[in-house]
Amino acid sequence: MEFEQAVKNRRSIRRFLDRDVPDELLTSLIDCALMAPSSMNGQPWNFIVIRDNETKARLAAVKNRYCPEDKKDYSADFIMEAPLLILTCVNRKLAFDRGIENGVLATAHLLLAAANSGLTTVYMSAHTPGMPEVAAEIRSILEIPQDFDPITLVPVGYPAEPPAAKTLKHVEEVLFHEAFGRKERLIQKQHRSSLQAGSKRCLQVS
Ligand SMILES: Cc1cc2nc3c(=O)[nH]c(=O)nc-3n(C[C@H](O)[C@H](O)[C@H](O)COP(=O)(O)O)c2cc1C
């Protein structure tokens, strides 16, 4: 599959076929996750694959228990239907104070690799700012050592339905040039030589 198509195919679908994910495929997803950038190249990740139904139920219960009031309609029960969950955790020391970024980037690779193989995933956090109980309970259930932080929890499986329609923003809405709010591209071309000379006179302005 072309890269762009895989990116565009990635959607969160919360119903899964009763079909397992082969081990080789799972290994290739983790291999793609390992290609993510990491602070100081610390590669601080570990990934826990959860197939046990009781463990899935305990994790769903934690997510539901600490779900904020305004999100109560979004139960985590669906994760029990996924053939497997992947918990990404990071070693705090190897993450150089950038645990969340390191964990999220590896997870993003994983989501795209899964989409490329026809799998669906749902990004879910395994920690909540201001609620250390969430990470603590997940750490306890999965026996994660104290010097590791759980970052994301991703159900993985084959989709049992097509994705819901999703409205996307247009590029023109979100893209600025040079400073926030500037929609016009004023600078057409900037020569490296002029930058090195520290001169602004050579800039070509339309
Ligand atoms: C930080 C973050 C937290 C999320 N948490 C949840 C969650 O707790 N439960 C859930 O079902 N989906 C969760 N999602 C998935 C989003 O709902 C989903 O990505 C979004 O609706 C866009 O849909 P798409 O992934 O199909 O493009 C989360 C996504 C992000 C980025």
Image (tube, rainbow, N blue to C red):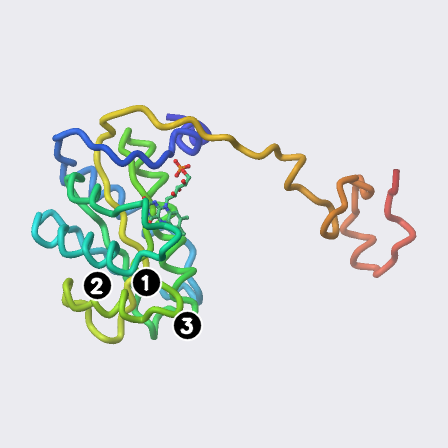
Foreground residue among 67 and 122: 67
Residue on which the image places disc 2: 138
* Labels 1 and 3: the sequence-earlier one: 3
Task: Tell me the mark number nearer the camera, choosing from 2 and 3.
Answer: 2
The answer to whether residue 61 is above or below residue 144 is above
Q: In the image, what residue occupies the spot 22% across and 59% down?
A: 62
Q: In the image, what residue occupies the spot 79% across and 46% down?
A: 190
Q: Amino acid at mark 2?
A: Ile
User: Quick check: can you spot residue 193?
Assistant: yes
Callouts 1 and 2 close, C-beta under 8 Å: yes
Q: Is residue 179 left or right of residue 130?
A: right
Q: CA distance from mark 1 to mark 2?
A: 8 Å
* Labels 1 and 2: the sequence-earlier one: 1
Q: Amino acid at mark 3?
A: Phe
- Residue 19 x, y percent position in the rendering: 13, 30
- Residue 18 x, y percent position in the rendering: 12, 30
Screen quadrant of the N terminus: top left
Residue on which the image places disc 3: 96
Q: Is residue 80 left or right of residue 152?
A: left
* Labels 2 and 3: the sequence-earlier one: 3
Residue on which the image places disc 1: 127
Q: Quadrant of ligand 1?
A: top left
Q: CA distance from mark 1 to mark 3?
A: 18 Å
In this view, the residue farthest toward the front is: 69
Task: Find numbered disc 1 in the image and state the secondary structure of the residue it sits on.
Answer: loop
In this view, the residue farthest toward the right is: 201
